[in-house]
Amino acid sequence: MNLPPLFLAAAAALSLAACASGPAASHQLSAEAGLVQRQLDAYNAHDLDGFIATYSPDIEIFEITDAATPRMTGLAGMREVYGEMFATIPNLHCNLGNRIAEGAYVIDHEICIMGEPSDPPERAIAIYQVEGGLIRRVWFAPVE
């Protein structure tokens, strides 16, 4: 199997983060990690305006399997897609499994309920790139 280099880097970073617990690990949030947490909190609250406010007007969202072509661009596209999700999936909720932040990048292991609470959760790695205090790009890699 030939995995994309960005996915391999994310997997390595998460492995390192899992090993970095203990007295020497820093638990202080960077500005970038705080921004990503705010968008996750807004997502879980189904607060479309608060969620959209964390993203750049030039946002690009990619699937890691096709990292050359964004699956969504711009705030209008996000508002349409996520607005419908927030309105039609009442149990929509995403838990943070693990997070690593380094410079402009925040990598989350997300465990999401996308339907009924009894449905198996969907797992993904999300790589957020922050520019100018807003999320500029996101790459999603599903985890099976």
Image (spheres, rainbow, N blue to C red):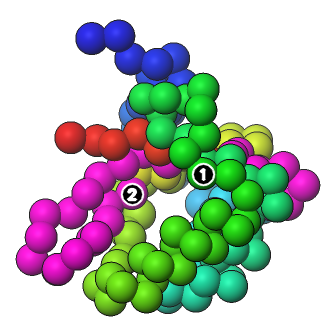
For mark 1, what is the residue? Answer: 72
Q: Choose between 75 and 129: the one closer to the eye.
A: 75
Looking at the rendering, in which quadrant would you find the N terminus? top left
For mark 2, what is the residue? Answer: 110
Q: Is residue 15 visible?
A: yes
Q: Position of residue 117 (x, y in %)?
A: 17, 80
Q: Position of residue 109 (x, y in %)?
A: 41, 51
Q: Position of residue 61 (x, y in %)?
A: 60, 48
Label 1 to label 2, Cα distance in Å?
19 Å
Mark 2 neighbour density, 10 Å: few (under 14) some (14–19) many (20 or more): many
Give the mark count: 2
Q: Is residue 128 visible?
A: no
Q: Residue at x 42, y 76 (%)?
A: 85
Q: Residue at x 62, y 66 (%)?
A: 78
The answer to whether 101 is drawn above or below residue 91 in the figure is above
The answer to whether 39 is drawn above or below residue 109 in the figure is below
Q: Name the magenta segment's main secondary structure.
A: strand
Left or right: 85 in relation to 117:
right
Tell me, yes or no, whether the highlighted magenta stretch contains residue 136: yes
Mark 1 neighbour density, 10 Å: few (under 14) some (14–19) many (20 or more): some
Residue placed furthest toward the left: 118
The answer to whether 10 is drawn above or below residue 27 in the figure is above
Q: Choose between 53 and 79: the one closer to the eye.
A: 79
Give the magenta part as a residue range. Answer: 110-137
Q: Position of residue 106 (x, y in %)?
A: 62, 48
Q: Label for residue 61?
A: none
Q: Residue at x 58, y 88 (%)?
A: 47
Tell me, yes or no, whether the highlighted magenta stretch contains residue 7: no
Q: Residue at x 49, y 88 (%)?
A: 45
Judged by depth in the image, the label closer to the viewer, 1 or 2, is: 1
Amino acid type, label 1: Met
